[in-house]
Image: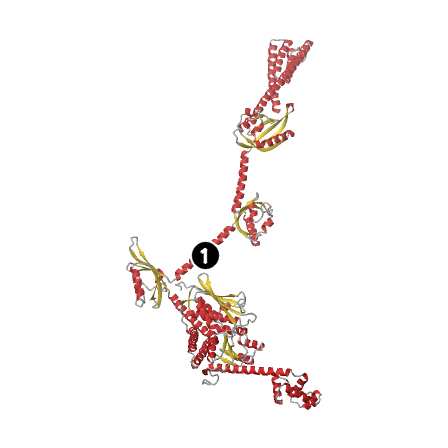
């Protein structure tokens, strides 16, 4: 307003200045021509009117006053003074003044009204333009805003739709207008649309928002977020305005997000990885993925408190975690990695590897620690297994290395002339007794080449025939000059054309094992001698029985001989009776000698002799010797020997010794039995696989608890006399026969001793 | 003793020196049983042999002079057990034990049980034959003695109770006067009883009567007074 007033003032001043000049010119001209007052006043009036038309009312008033002053000064008498003495002049001046003022006012008023009218018109015109602009803008907004606008009536008929909306749905506006809005919705969604429209109609003026799918003309779908509001229109008609925003992308993003979350959860579940975020200040988790709960053995649906979770971490690990967190708080950067264990309620232990990093707040302090827990239990187990396997492998490697380094084996190669061309490295070291040297013939080094000519002749034939050989044992001298035994095997080598190139083979110093064999032979001999000694001892114990066995036929011989004499002395001599008596004498004599034969066999023999034999024969022989022993112990013996048993390969005497021992043990075990008949049962039969058994069963005192095995040890005895070697010798005899001797309880009380021996594989009788 | 005695029995004569007699043999060993039978038969003895004690017990022993040659060790019932069993059954057959290897406790028990002999195998034939003959002789004598006692017993049964009382005092060697005093009788009454006794018992003399009381096992009565 201020500049306008200034402008008006400046305008008025200019008008006043121009008006003043015009008046001055008029006054000057009229004064020169000596025009009278009335004429001049008239001319002035014209000037003032003219200026009133272009200038303001105030200017006109000022010009009017100036004009009055100049009229009075120049034209009213007396001239050149402001005094008016002619009353006509006063009337003229007054009339001029009133007229000028009136006309100026009228012109000013008219001009003002015209200005107002012009202003109003301009304003109107302006507002019309603005309105048009605004409408255009709004229409553009309506048409081109990427929002679909629908206007539908209460029945759902589309009243209007913006072209964007129609285009989005693949229709033209004309196609949509007049049709039902339901056409752009899926059948299944239509009830929902109706319901939404009904809600809008019930609550006029309130806007409602929902998300729904729309179907395009081509059948494709889009997700929209609809904002709707019912309004009253002219005639009280209700319409619903709907603005729809295409949220398909958002929906897809949401879906993708959901899916990716699902994938993440899935991936976490699969990889046993849980992610979490720890609020440092709140000292609680702000986020834990479901897998974290699962790792700790909780149901993700039910969740668990930080305390519950921490209670499943062993105390030492928990302390370690605290320290790691403290370090992270101080370091404020970097990645933390730590391992800890989870103790599950079922006792299992999970091993977890955790990776985390601190998150800083605006002030640069650690506010959160975000990380992952990865279940490495299986990896740990696999790792342990692997470590074990590696360890085992390493051990085995070391073992083979040790073998190789300490083995007395050496490798050799010979050329087609059987001269040594190559010896393995350690064969030449000082402690390995490889006697050959490169260039030697292999048999030149043997010290038994002359003494075992046959063996070497055969070997040389093999070599000439270019055949492989195995386990040739020969004697030689090592570098120190002591005699050693070498076992060697070799295989001929041919080139691609089948040309003989020589032999390749391996040799071993078997001196130690040969010596061991010798020692074993000595041991076996000692065992045989011990067996003999105990056998003779047993025979000593059996003296009374044996004496009886000899006495009995001897007594019969004497009685029959006396009878024979008597029959001959008769008159006449009864020769038949005498002959019968003589025959009996022979029989009984043989019987006695048989007993003596058996005893001698048991007493004398120490050499072991393996022959195919029937175990039943051995048992029968023994029973012949111990018959008296049985009756003196008041024991009745039952023999249940299976007929036609396969033969076994063994030493008859030693096996009989075993049976005698078992029988005598059985008799002694029954000595204190008075409440039942003492029964000894000897059985034989087949035993799987391809074995024969013989058992001696008694119904005596049985085997004391826990002594079933101990009684086979040397010097174990429950008797006041005896060496306690019996069962121990028996077992070693049976085992030397590749058999087994065992003791068990007899079902009817007492004990059963049984041995099994392998069948003889050779020809059977 | 090295010479073979040929006095008795005399198999060479072919006679039956021991008539109405039988020898039982029990031995579980067949050849021994056979040899013993052979030997005893060769001297003309009747023999019956068994393998076990129970086999013998099944048979009723004949009323003839006999003896038993018994192996001390037998399956089942042993020789010593059989001896006990026979004694219980009041079968008083003389037993000759034979054994392969006799031991002292067994011998003692056998002898206490009334064995007539105990032979260890192998034994000389004469040892056995002598033992058998003497055993049969002993059995025969026992059988005869048994028969005498039985007839005396029958005579004794005919005595009245008063006569038996008097006989007991007579056996104790008391005079008639003393017996009368013991029993409170007149001397003449005792004398009459004594006559009846002599007559009923068919005693030829006082000594004969005394021997009869001994055979019958009548215990002499003790004097109450004095």
The residue indicated by pointer 1 is A392
Badge 1: residue crowd in 10 Å (few <14, some 14–19, many ≥20): few
Q: Chain of mark 1?
A: A
**In the image, residue A132 lies at what x, y percent?**
58, 22
In terms of depth relative to the viewer, which is nearer, A63 or A623?
A: A623
**In the image, residue A642 lies at what x, y percent?**
46, 64
The furthest residue to the left: A417
The image quarter in which residue A417 lies: bottom left
In terms of depth relative to the viewer, which is nearer, B126 or B76?
A: B126
Placement of the N terminus of chain A among the 4 image quadrants:
top right
**In the image, residue A388 lies at what x, y percent?**
47, 55
Would residue B226 be visible to someone looking at this image?
Answer: no
A258 left or right of A408?
Answer: right
**Residue at x 62% of width, y 89% of height:** B205
**In the image, residue B112 lies at what x, y percent?**
56, 80
Q: Is residue A27 above or below residue A615?
A: above
A356 left or right of A434?
Answer: right
Tell me the colour scheme of the image: secondary structure
Would residue B139 be visible to someone looking at this image?
Answer: yes
Q: Secondary structure under badge 1? A: helix
Placement of the C terminus of chain A among the 4 image quadrants:
bottom left
In terms of depth relative to the viewer, which is nearer, A587 or A537?
A: A587
The image quarter in which residue A419 lies: bottom left
Counting labels gives 1
A475 left or right of A277?
Answer: left
């Amino acid at each position: 307003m201020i500049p306008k007033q200034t402008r008006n003032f400046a305008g008025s001043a200019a008008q006043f200045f121009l008006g003043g000049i015009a008046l001055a010119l008029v006054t000057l001209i009229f004064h020169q021509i000596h025009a009278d007052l009335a004429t001049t006043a008239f001319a002035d009036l014209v000037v003032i009117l003219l200026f009133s038309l272009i200038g303001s009312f105030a200017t006109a008033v000022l010009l009017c006053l100036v004009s009055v002053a100049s009229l009075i000064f120049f034209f009213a008498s007396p001239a050149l003074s402001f005094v008016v003495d002619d009353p006509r002049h006063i009337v003229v001046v007054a009339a001029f003044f009133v007229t000028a003022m009136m006309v100026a006012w009228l012109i000013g008023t008219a001009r003002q009204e015209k200005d107002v009218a012009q202003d109003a018109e301009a304003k109107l015109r302006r507002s019309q333009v603005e309105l048009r602009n605004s409408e255009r803008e709004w229409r553009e907004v309506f048409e081109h805003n990427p929002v679909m606008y629908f206007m539908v009536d209460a029945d759902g008929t589309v009243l209007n739709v913006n072209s964007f909306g129609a285009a989005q749905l693949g229709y033209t506006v004309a196609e949509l207008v007049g049709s039902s809005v339901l056409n752009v919705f899926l059948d299944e969604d239509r009830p929902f649309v109706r319901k939404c429209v009904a809600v809008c109609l019930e609550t006029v003026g309130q806007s409602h928002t929902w998300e729904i799918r729309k179907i395009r003309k081509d059948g494709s779908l889009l997700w929209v977020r609809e904002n709707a509001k019912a309004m009253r229109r002219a005639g009280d008609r209700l319409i619903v305005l709907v603005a729809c925003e295409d949220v398909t992308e958002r929906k897809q993003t949401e879906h993708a997000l959901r899916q990716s979350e699902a994938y993440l959860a899935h991936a976490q579940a699969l990889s046993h990885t849980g992610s979490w975020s720890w609020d440092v200040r709140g000292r609680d988790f702000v986020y834990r993925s479901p897998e974290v709960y699962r790792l700790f053995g909780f149901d993700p649906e039910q969740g668990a408190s930080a305390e519950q979770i921490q209670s499943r971490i062993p105390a030492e690990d928990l302390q370690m975690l605290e320290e790691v967190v403290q370090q992270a708080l101080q370091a404020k950067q970097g990645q933390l990695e730590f391992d800890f264990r989870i103790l599950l309620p079922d006792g299992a232990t999970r091993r977890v590897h955790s990776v985390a990093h601190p998150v800083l707040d605006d002030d640069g302090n650690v506010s959160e620690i975000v990380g992952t827990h990865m279940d490495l239990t299986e990896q740990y187990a696999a790792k342990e297994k692997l470590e074990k396997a590696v360890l085992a492998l390493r051990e085995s490697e070391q073992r083979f290395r040790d073998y190789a380094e300490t083995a007395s084996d050496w490798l050799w190669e010979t050329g087609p002339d059987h001269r040594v061309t190559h010896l393995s490295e350690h064969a030449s070291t000082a402690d390995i007794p490889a006697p050959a040297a490169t260039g030697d013939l292999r048999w030149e080094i043997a010290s038994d080449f002359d003494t075992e000519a046959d063996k070497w002749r055969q070997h040389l034939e093999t070599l000439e025939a270019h055949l492989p050989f195995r386990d040739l044992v020969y004697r030689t001298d090592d570098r120190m000059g002591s005699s050693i035994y070498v076992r060697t095997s070799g295989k001929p080598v041919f080139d691609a054309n089948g040309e003989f190139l020589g032999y390749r083979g391996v040799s071993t110093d078997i001196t130690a094992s040969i010596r061991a064999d010798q020692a074993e032979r000595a041991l076996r001999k000692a065992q045989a001698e011990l067996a003999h000694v105990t056998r003779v001892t047993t025979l000593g114990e059996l003296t009374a029985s044996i004496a009886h066995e000899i006495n009995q036929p001897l007594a019969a011989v004497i009685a029959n001989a006396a009878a024979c004499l008597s029959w001959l002395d008769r008159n006449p001599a009864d020769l038949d009776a005498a002959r019968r008596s003589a025959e009996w004498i022979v029989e009984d004599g043989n019987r006695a000698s048989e007993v003596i034969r058996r005893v001698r066999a048991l007493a004398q023999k120490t050499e072991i002799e393996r022959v195919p034999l029937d175990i039943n024969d051995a048992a029968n022989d023994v029973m012949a010797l111990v018959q008296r022993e049985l009756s003196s112990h008041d024991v009745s013996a039952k023999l249940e020997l299976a007929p036609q048993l396969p033969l076994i390969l063994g030493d008859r005497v030693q096996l009989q010794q075993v049976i005698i021992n078992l029988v005598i043990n059985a008799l002694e075990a029954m000595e204190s039995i008075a409440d039942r008949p003492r029964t000894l049962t000897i059985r034989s039969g087949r035993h799987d696989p391809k074995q024969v058994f013989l058992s001696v069963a008694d119904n005596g005192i049985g085997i004391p608890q826990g002594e079933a095995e101990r009684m086979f040890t040397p010097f174990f005895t429950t008797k006041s006399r005896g060496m306690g070697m019996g069962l121990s010798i028996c077992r070693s005899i049976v085992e030397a026969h590749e058999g087994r001797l065992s003791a068990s309880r007899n079902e009817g009380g007492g004990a059963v001793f049984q041995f099994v021996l392998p069948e003889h594989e050779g020809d059977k009788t | 003793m090295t010479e073979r005695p040929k006095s008795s029995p005399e198999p060479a004569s072919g006679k039956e020196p021991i008539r109405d007699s039988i020898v039982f043999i029990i031995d579980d060993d067949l050849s021994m049983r056979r040899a013993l039978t052979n030997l005893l038969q060769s001297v003309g003895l009747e023999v019956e042999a068994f393998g076990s004690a129970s086999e013998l017990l099944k048979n009723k022993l004949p009323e003839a002079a006999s003896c038993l040659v018994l192996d001390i060790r037998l399956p089942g019932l042993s020789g010593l057990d059989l001896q006990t069993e026979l004694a219980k059954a009041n079968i008083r057959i003389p037993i000759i034990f034979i054994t392969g290897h006799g031991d002292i406790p067994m011998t003692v028990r056998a002898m206490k049980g009334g064995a007539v002999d105990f032979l260890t195998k192998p034994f000389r034939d004469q040892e056995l034959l002598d033992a058998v003959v003497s055993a049969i002789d002993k059995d025969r004598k026992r059988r005869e003695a048994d028969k005498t006692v039985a007839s005396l017993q029958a005579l004794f049964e005919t005595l009245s109770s008063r006569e038996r009382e008097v006989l007991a005092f007579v056996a104790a060697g008391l005079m008639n006067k003393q017996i009368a005093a013991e029993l409170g009788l007149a001397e003449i009454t005792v004398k009459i009883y004594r006559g009846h006794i002599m007559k009923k018992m068919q005693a030829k003399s006082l000594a004969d009567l005394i021997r009869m009381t001994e055979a019958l096992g009548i215990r002499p009565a003790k004097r109450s007074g004095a």
